[in-house]
Amino acid sequence: MYSVKLMKPLLNVKEEIISLKNSETTKKLLLKVLLLSLIGAILTALTVYFSSDLEMQIRKTGETDIEKYKLITSAVTGILGLFIPIVTITLFTIFSWIFFQELSFKKLFIVQTYSYVIGVVGQLGQVLIMFSLGVDSLYSPFGLASLSQSLFDSKYINSLMNCFTIFSVWSVVFQIISLKYLSTRSKKNIITVVILLNAVSWILLAAWS
């Protein structure tokens, strides 16, 4: 039986994924996904709370009790953030399964859960940067958004460049390595599918933001 963990697979990919591949059953998946959702919700709320853009938008409305509205907006966003990990992991798993139907849906779901953990680590780093330096996510030292803003005036391009971070690259590499051990597909096939799925998600995320 394979026990789902959140951090160990990121540090020891080969051993964990091979163990997952050889297992017939798994445990603690639901518990870890719920924990990930809770952590993600808290980090999402904090990201919104520390956003200077939110404060400027509140000031434009003429509201004087800025702190109150920041707390309310952060709380609402945090509640919605509870569902973001589950929805994101599920959608990625569904689209991955279309290309890797020889693998079980649950094992693909676990791989995408681990991949999402990397994003949460990046989100934690971003919150710490926002708290300590008082800068928004577009000025994160982890991505290309800061450079992009000096070259382009397009909000969409800057948002798209904000998706390219050391953590998004780490996530893509993790997915490729994991699927290499799980799937019988060629390495070229795996790399193509993983990059394609992630690229589409970045494009949609940039458009939505």
Image: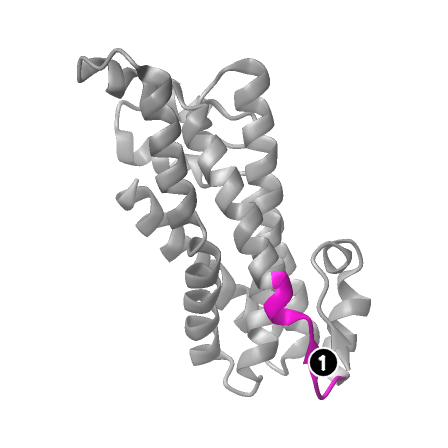
Q: In which quarter of the image is residue 206?
A: top left
Point 51% across, 26% down: residue? 140
Q: Quadrant of the C terminus?
A: top left
- Magenta-span inclusion, residue 54: no
Q: What residue type is labelled 1?
A: Lys
Mark 1 lies on residue: 21
Point 47% across, 62% down: residue? 86
Point 54% across, 50% down: residue? 38
132 and 201: which one is in front? Answer: 132
Q: In which quarter of the image is residue 156?
A: top left
63 and 207: which one is in front? Answer: 63
> Is 181 located above or below residue 31 in the figure?
below
Residue bounds of the magenta highlight:
23-32
In percent of width and height, residue 126 lies at 55, 31
> Is 197 located above or below residue 57 in the figure?
below
In percent of width and height, residue 56 lies at 29, 16
Residue 168 in sight here: yes
> Is 192 located above or below residue 173 in the figure?
below
Local packing at callout 1 (Cα closer than 10 Å; few below 14, some 14-19, many 20+) is some
Residue 196 in sight here: no
- The image's colour scheme reads one colour
